[in-house]
Image: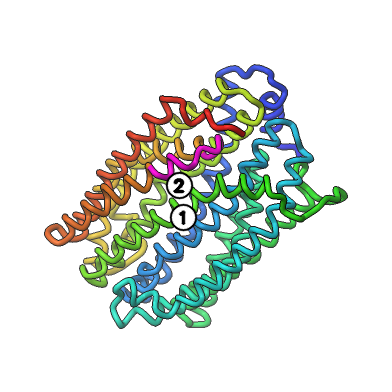
Amino acid sequence: MKLPTDGLLQLIRDGRPLTTGQRIRLVIFLSVPAVMANLTSIVMQYIDAAMVGHLGAEASASIGLVSTSTWLFGGLCGACATGFSVQVAHRIGAADMAGARDVLRQSLWPTCIFGLLLGLTGSAISGPLPHWLGGDAGICRDSSIYFLIFSMTVPIWQMGLLAGAMLRCSGNMKVPSILSICMCVLDVIFNYLLIYVAGIGVAGAALGTAAAEIVVSAVMMWYLFRRSGTLSLKGRPGSFRPTAPVLRRAVHIGLPVGVEHALICGAQIASTVIVAPLGVCAIAANSFAVIAESLCYMPGYGISEAATTLVGQCIGAGRKLLTRSFARIAVLMGMGVMTAMGVLMYIFAPEMIGVMTPVAEIRDLGIMALRVEAFAEPMYAAAIVCYGAFVGAADTLIPCMMNVLSIWGVRITLAAWLAPSMGLKGVWIAMCIELCFRGIIFLWRLATGSWMKHKH
């Protein structure tokens, strides 16, 4: 499939100059599909939350209680995929297509095994997990069932994430984005049938999402292996046995990302533990506000994915000046988009929360949280997109340490201090302050240029 970005990406690999207009267009072309896919994914969560929210506060809280744990698993799966996909981007940038396909082959067994181990771990802890998180006895059973179903689909989800990451790093944002939209549509259909028609409530939400993920992951892998112009393995024999250099490089790139996700999600779980004593309504409002806020920051993650692809290919091509230029363009674009989204979130907070719950107390708490968080969106964008650029350059260790320091040293400390006196508002004020701090330190690292000095 010939994509509109192919010609511009070829200029990078050929060492030819790109005008400022071409650079901006390339960032936009790669960002828009990813932004749409991420927004659609959040709309899916939004609709899920609205469907479950109308079952009552306890049903909402049962999912909200384990939401940070599902993000933890998702982050670990993403880190595993990143360790290999960034290597593919570097090889494509160096015009080594055969080498890129070799990395793809070698990634399959390690990624599959990692997903299986993670799924088994999640299944084993699904019973006691809600109790560890301080959940009320009335919601723990549904929380356990939800997390068990989620964990059983992790291995397939892991392979779908790998396929999507490989396609994006090759410059193909369109197909993963289309399939993400399809997953959202399927999720809504399956959830409606299982939650309302079959009447199985919270378990129906988990099963519906799992079914959608299985279908889309299978199609994503088929497309990567059979149809991708750059990475298709059809008619291209080679060894699937992992080699030490590729595995070492994957660990070097992916391990800091995985540890960071674990520590950050651990901090989010700690936030859940801080929120849990505030009551069922506070848990539900916190969960709904996180989902609603995602509508603002998911465009930043879409632009971040474009930054990873462009920086990765520029680094592979040995074009450091172009690398810096693309990173700066992407960061400015992300900050502009998320600033606008923050303004909209502040204005339409009542509508955004009102869609998900009819409970007045939950609605009021959720509106308050969104309006506090709106002020952090520009700096949050800076952190998100800078991080994507650093990952493309295989600079993961120091940025991961910066993320961990920020969220544990600033957010959790402030939240634990403010929550007893200010309730949920204190937790979200702490989050707003921390995200502004994180954006500032990431912009500082971007300006130094030290992130481009790694050996590849």
Q: Is residue 408 magenta?
A: no
Identify the disc placed on residue 116: none
**Which residue is situated farthest in the left direction here?**
421
- Residue designated by label 2: 298
Q: Which residues are magenta?
A: 391-401
Asked if labels 2 and 1 touch by Cβ distance under 8 angstroms, the answer is: yes
Q: What is the x, y in percent for residue 170?
A: 67, 40
Q: Is residue 339 left or right of residue 410?
A: right
Q: What is the x, y in percent for residue 92?
A: 70, 35
The residue depicted at 60 percent of the width and 35 percent of the height is: 312
Is residue 432 positioned above or below 213 on the image? Answer: above
Q: What is the x, y in percent for residue 270?
A: 31, 62
Secondary structure under the numbered disc 1 in the rendered image = helix
Is residue 407 positioned above or below 443 on the image? Answer: below
Let me know if residue 418 appears in the view.
yes
* Total number of numbered discs in the rendering: 2
Residue type pointed to by label 2: Met
Choose top left, top right, bottom left or bottom right for residue 28: top right
Alpha carbon of mark 1 to alpha carbon of mark 2: how far?
Answer: 8 Å
Colour scheme of the picture: rainbow
Let me know if residue 189 appears in the view.
no
* Dominant secondary structure, magenta: helix
Q: Is residue 19 left or right of residue 449?
A: right
Front residue of 97/397: it is 397
- Residue designated by label 1: 42
Choose top left, top right, bottom left or bottom right for residue 154: bottom right
Question: Crowding near pointer 2: few (<14 within 10 Å), some, many (20+)?
Answer: many
Q: Is residue 399 magenta?
A: yes
Q: Is residue 236 left or right of residue 261?
A: right
Q: What is the x, y in percent for residue 351?
A: 32, 55
